[in-house]
Each structure stands twice: as C-alpha cells, then as structure tokens.
Image (spheres, grey):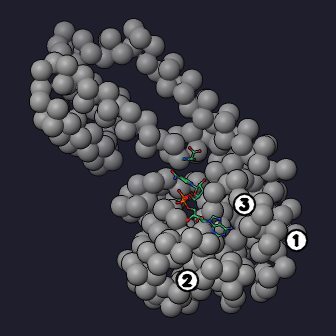
C-alpha cells in the first residue's frame, strides 16, 4: 500500500471513512486523490485529510493504481461509462456500491478489468467496520492484497469465494448496524416505559450493547453459551427470552435477513441494466 496511488470517485461518507483509515495507517496524503461534483464535499475532505481533490473524475484517476468507486449505486453506470475512455494502466477497480455486480461494472467500463467488489458497513467511520470482498478473475495476488489493506484500514476484511454471497453479506453486516440500532431504540423505549428516565434507559442500553458485543468478540465460547450464563433457571432473563421466542424472534430475524438479501439481488437486477 505504501507506494500505491489511490483515487476515490465520490467523496461522501464511506470514502471519508476509508480515507481516514488509510491516513491513520500512515498512507501519505499525496498518495490519495478524490473527486466529487459537490464543492462542499471536496472542501471538507481536502481540509480534513490534506488530499488533492478534483471536480473531474477523469483527472482524479490519472496515474492511479487503485480506483475506488464510492458513489451511490444509481449513478454508477453513468460514472463508469464516462471513466472508461480515461482509464489507463489497468488500475485495480474497487467498488463499494450495494447491488452492483462485477459483470455490470465490466460491461460499463468496457473491457475485462481487475475488479474487487466489497460490501463495507458504516462503523467503518470508527474503524470498527467489517467488509465482505469478492475479486473477479482479472485481479492479481498483489492487487488482492491492496484491496484487503484498503478495507482492513477501517475494520475486518473477509474474502468471499462467490460473488452471489455479497447479497448475504449485505443482509448480515451491510444493513446489520441498523438492526442493532433498532434494538437499542426498542430497549430504550421499553426501559422508559418501565419508569427509568429516558437518558438513564439510553445509557443502560448502550453500555449493555457495547459490553455484550465486546464479551462476544473476546470470548472463546459462542453467543449461545454466553446467553446461557446470563440466564438463571426460572429467573428474569429466562422470562424475557421465552417471551422473545414465543413471539417468533429467530424466525423474524431470518425473514428480515431474507428480505434484505432478496432486495440486494433485486437491486443488482434493476441497476445492472
Ligand atoms: N451507507 C452505508 O451503510 C453503506 C454504503 N455503501 C455504499 O457506499 C457507496 C457510497 O455511499 P455513501 O458514502 O454512504 O454515500 P454519499 O452520498 O455520502 O457519497 C456519495 C458521493 O458521491 C458523490 N457523487 C455523486 N455523483 C458523482 C459523480 N458523478 N462523480 C463523482 N462523485 C459523485 C456525491 O456528491 C457524494 O458526495 C454507495 O454505493 C453505497 O451503496 C456500502 C455499504 C454500506
Ligand atoms: O440500505 C442499503 O441499501 C445500503 C446497503 C447496505 C447499507 N445500506
């Protein structure tokens, strides 16, 4: 990574997280460029990270070893078709867009190209993200290492053998932070209904979420065993868990993730044309 030049197309939230992670890992500012039509985004990212910014995508990719596509899925086709004639030196293309396949990218970029498709998540902002990565057949071993270094700058990076599994990764971890936020919202509201001041209910919930996640990550036993250790026979936890299970909690989680994975595949179908 130390000698690679990286260009970001789109300087929004995910690009800012990735650039922050790369800078924190010691990649020099002059190795990173970014382009965005938004003057505000350009000014913010330049001020925050000291990198060179461009209004023109074509200018930003000059001399790049890695081009990171960090625009919304809906504009990806237009962006790629405009980039295609300006790509020289066959850089590694890294796409973080939800629901855009390697086949669509290859089609829009106009030639077989080394492409790594990733699904990161927003905790990347705190370098606590996790990403699933898939490399097409054109990607060299050195380029795979580059992509992995890029995504591991903001968290855990896990390779996938099949591109279709990106839909499952999107369902589990891409959208996943929102499920935990929903549980945090619901537990805070329930604590308030039980009589706690809102702020106390929120702080109890948040620290419990953090503590439970840290315990589960650090532990050498699985989550089911950790749950059993909290659950005294005929105690309070058992009363709550039985209520979750009577309401079909596990089946509901499966249905929710099935819906997310299905939507990811549908988006690929719709946006890939
Ligand atoms: N937010 C999330 O939880 C996740 C997002 N992603 C993917 O990351 C990608 C970026 O998402 P965010 O950073 O959240 O969006 P964002 O809206 O913050 O950033 C996108 C940026 O692209 C810029 N842009 C628009 N048209 C452009 C063009 N023609 N050329 C260059 N830049 C252009 C916009 O001005 C904006 O700054 C999306 O494809 C999304 O699917 C992936 C995983 C999780
Ligand atoms: O909701 C979405 O479609 C995107 C993809 C993963 C997280 N946000």
Residue at the farthest front position = 39
* Residue occupying image coordinates x 80% and y 50%: 272
- Counting from the top left corner in percent of width and height, residue 71 is at 63, 62
- Counting from the top left corner in percent of width and height, residue 9 is at 63, 72
Q: Which residue is mark 3?
A: 76
Q: Is residue 119 left or right of residue 84?
A: left
Tell me the SS state at disc 1: loop
The quadrant holding residue 103 is bottom right
The reply to whether discs 2 and 1 touch (Cβ–Cβ < 8 Å) is: no
Q: Which residue is mark 2?
A: 53
Label 2 crowd (10 A; few <14 / some 14-19 / many >=20): many
Q: Is residue 167 above or below residue 39?
A: above
- Counting from the top left corner in percent of width and height, residue 224 is at 35, 29
CA distance separating discs 1 and 3: 16 Å
Q: Is residue 186 above or below residue 181?
A: above
Find out if the beta carbon at label 2 lies less than 8 Å from the nearest ligand 1 atom: no
Foreground disc of the pair 2, 1: 2
Query: 127 and 228: which one is in front?
Result: 127
Label 1 crowd (10 A; few <14 / some 14-19 / many >=20): few
The quadrant holding residue 113 is bottom right
Q: Earlier in the sequence, mark 1 or mark 3?
A: 3
Q: Which mark is residue 111?
A: 1
CA distance separating discs 2 and 1: 27 Å
Q: Quadrant of the N terminus?
A: bottom right
């Amino acid at each position: 990574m130390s000698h690679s030049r990286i260009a970001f197309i789109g300087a929004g939230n995910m690009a800012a997280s990735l650039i922050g992670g790369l800078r924190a890992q010691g990649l020099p500012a002059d190795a990173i460029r970014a382009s965005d039509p938004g003057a505000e985004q350009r000014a913010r990212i330049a001020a925050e990270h000291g990198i060179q910014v461009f209004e023109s995508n074509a200018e930003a990719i000059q001399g790049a070893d890695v081009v990171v596509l960090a625009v919304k899925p809906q504009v990806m086709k237009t962006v790629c078709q405009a980039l295609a004639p300006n790509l020289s030196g066959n850089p590694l293309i890294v796409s973080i867009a939800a629901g855009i396949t390697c086949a669509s990218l290859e089609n829009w970029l106009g030639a077989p190209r080394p492409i790594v498709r990733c699904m990161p998540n927003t905790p990347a902002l705190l370098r606590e993200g996790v990403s699933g990565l898939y490399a097409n057949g054109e990607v060299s071993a050195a380029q795979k290492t580059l992509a992995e270094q890029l995504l591991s700058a903001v968290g855990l990076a896990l390779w996938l053998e099949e591109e279709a599994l990106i839909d499952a990764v999107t369902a589990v971890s891409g959208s996943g932070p929102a499920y935990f936020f929903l549980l945090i919202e619901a537990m805070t509201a329930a604590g308030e209904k039980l009589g706690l001041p809102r702020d106390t209910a929120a702080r109890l919930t948040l620290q419990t979420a953090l503590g439970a996640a840290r315990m589960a990550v650090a532990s050498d036993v699985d989550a089911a065993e950790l749950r059993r250790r909290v659950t005294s026979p005929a105690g309070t936890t058992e009363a709550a868990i039985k209520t979750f299970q009577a309401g079909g909690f596990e089946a509901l989680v499966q249905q929710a993730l099935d819906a997310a994975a299905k939507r990811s595949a549908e988006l690929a179908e719709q946006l890939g044309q």
